């Protein structure tokens, strides 16, 4: 008969004790609903609803069997695998089968396991030292970034105040300039300049008309000279006469002659043309003849009282023509210097741009403080590029940036995706969360999806890529090691104590 505690885990052994009632021994099912004879425990027949009376057999479905594995580590298997004629790997002591069916290999398996655990602990100890240096670097970076944030915030505040100050100056300057311009428009000097301008435009118009008239008269005279016959009045002479009448705006000679006898209408008003409308406001030839001499005798620089605001104008008026270019160059350099110091019109715009640049720097600094691990251990690896040569291709992953595939035979590589997230199946702060990185939205496969990479890391003394596999079309899994995942051994001991 089987021992009553056969297949019972250490935590429940104390519950497999019989109840004595006189000469009878009974046992209560673990869920408390039934009391059975003590002899019914492990008798290969399921009596309890919860199956607790058969811990060492396969009589009750969905039960668990515990292998003690002395010399190694205990394990639990499904009770359906008990007494099935197969030696289960989890039960190195062979207790899942009848005695002598499976050899007890726990001493050898235990020794190999302890050797493996020792190697892993050594690896973790070495890796955790490197990880500690990563954390120290992260702390320094954090302090640097925090100080940078403070400086950028102050700079933004300073820039914004400067922008407001210069904007106020610009608005007041615009207001003063507009009022001064309006005042100058009412000044005698400005009115005099307007009159001179009108006179010049009128002269220009008259001069243009005289030039056109001279050319036309020349054409008429040439025509008359070429076609004139002194013996009699021919058609050439008639054509020249009519051309002159048209140019001079005279009525036809026959109409004039008829007018001696009757009334010929020579004063019909012509409709205004577009050119006539444009010329409105200009002086007539008669007004030019009357006003021009008096106008030319007036000095426009002496019209109206002197103004402090017109100092620049007065200076340039008295500078000889040969020295004007040098004066203008000096004036422009002074205005440029004023602009640099923020007092020119460009000062507001430049300072506003500086403020925007400061804001952009602040945003980048905040982005730098994204999740680099609970203690910042991944910050040191930001931008680190790891490669793996698989023969046909070399795979490169630049952490937190981009994964690429490069053909070794030459040619350009393709993007396998850019960093998008950590392991979404776990929560931030958990060790499992930082064991996987996702790189997505790589180059599109022909007739397939965009390339992507799942980067799976384990604790190791070096940052390295180990294997590359294409699990699905254009979906890659790359494994690697990094000290960033080597938690200190104290963490494990604390967890065991809890």
Image (spheres, rainbow, N blue to C red):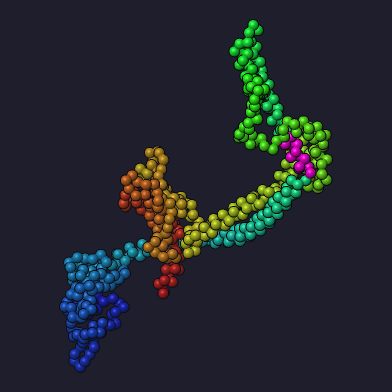
Q: Is residue 313 left or right of residue 368?
A: right
Main secondary structure of the magenta stretch: helix
- State the image coordinates of residue 370 (x, y, percent, origin top left): 49, 60
Front residue of 349/31: it is 349
Measured as percent of width and height from the top left, residue 431 is found at: 42, 64
Q: Which of 18 and 33 is in front in this view?
A: 33
Point 41% across, 74% down: residue: 497
Left/right placement of residue 247 relative to residue 494 reads right
Which quadrant is home to the N terminus?
Answer: bottom left
Looking at the image, which is closer to me, 266 or 374?
Answer: 266
Q: Quadrant of residue 53?
A: bottom left
Q: Is residue 361 left or right of residue 446?
A: right
Q: Residue at x 29, y 79 (%)?
A: 12
Q: Is residue 11 visible?
A: yes
Q: Position of residue 262 (x, y in %)?
A: 64, 25
Q: Give the range drawn in magenta.
A: 188-199
* Residue 334 against residue 439 in the figure, above or below: above
Image quadrant occupied by the C terminus: bottom left
């Amino acid at each position: 008969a089987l021992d009553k505690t056969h297949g019972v885990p250490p935590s429940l052994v104390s519950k497999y004790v019989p109840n004595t009632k006189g000469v009878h021994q009974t046992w209560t099912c673990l869920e408390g609903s039934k009391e059975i004879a003590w002899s019914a425990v492990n008798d290969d027949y399921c009596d309890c609803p919860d199956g607790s009376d058969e811990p060492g057999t396969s009589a009750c479905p969905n039960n668990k069997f515990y292998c003690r594995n002395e010399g190694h580590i205990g394990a639990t298997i499904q009770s359906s695998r008990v007494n099935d004629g197969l030696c289960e790997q989890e039960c190195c002591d062979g207790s899942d089968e009848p005695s002598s069916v499976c050899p007890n290999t726990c001493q050898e398996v235990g020794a190999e396991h302890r050797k493996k655990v020792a190697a892993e602990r050594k690896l973790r100890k070495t890796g955790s030292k490197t990880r500690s240096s990563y954390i120290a670097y992260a702390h320094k970076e954090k302090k640097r970034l925090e100080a940078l944030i403070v400086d950028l915030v102050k700079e933004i505040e300073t820039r914004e105040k400067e922008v407001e100050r210069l904007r106020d100056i610009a608005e007041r300057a615009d207001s003063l300039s507009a009022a001064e311009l309006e005042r100058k428009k009412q000044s005698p000097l400005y009115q005099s300049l307007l009159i001179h301008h009108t006179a010049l435009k009128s002269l220009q118009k008259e001069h243009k008309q005289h030039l056109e008239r001279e050319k036309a008269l020349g054409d008429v005279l040439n025509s008359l000279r070429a076609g004139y016959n002194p013996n009699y009045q021919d058609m050439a002479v008639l054509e020249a006469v009519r051309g002159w009448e048209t140019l001079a705006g005279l009525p036809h000679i026959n109409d004039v002659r008829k007018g001696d006898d009757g009334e010929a209408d020579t004063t019909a008003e012509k409709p205004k043309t577009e050119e006539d409308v444009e010329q409105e406001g200009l002086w007539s030839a008669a007004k030019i003849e009357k006003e021009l001499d008096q106008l030319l005798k007036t000095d426009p620089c002496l019209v109206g009282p002197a103004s402090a605001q017109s100092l620049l104008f007065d200076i340039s008026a008295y500078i000889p023509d040969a020295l004007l270019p040098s004066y203008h160059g000096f004036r422009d350099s002074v205005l440029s210097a004023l602009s640099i110091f923020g007092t020119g019109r460009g000062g507001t715009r430049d300072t506003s741009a500086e403020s925007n640049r400061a804001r952009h720097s602040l945003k980048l600094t905040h982005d730098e403080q994204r999740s680099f691990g609970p203690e910042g251990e991944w910050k040191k690896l930001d931008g680190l590029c790891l490669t793996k040569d698989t023969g046909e291709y070399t795979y490169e992953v630049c952490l937190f940036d981009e994964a690429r595939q490069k053909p070794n035979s030459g040619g350009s590589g393709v993007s396998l995706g850019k960093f998008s997230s950590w392991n979404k199946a776990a929560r931030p702060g958990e060790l499992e969360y930082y064991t996987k990185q996702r790189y997505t939205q790589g180059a599109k496969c022909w007739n397939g999806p965009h390339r992507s990479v799942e980067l799976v890391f384990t604790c190791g003394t070096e940052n390295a890529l180990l294997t590359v596999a294409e699990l699905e079309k254009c979906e890659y899994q790359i494994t690697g090691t990094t000290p960033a995942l080597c938690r200190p051994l104290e963490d494990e001991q604390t967890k065991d104590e809890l």
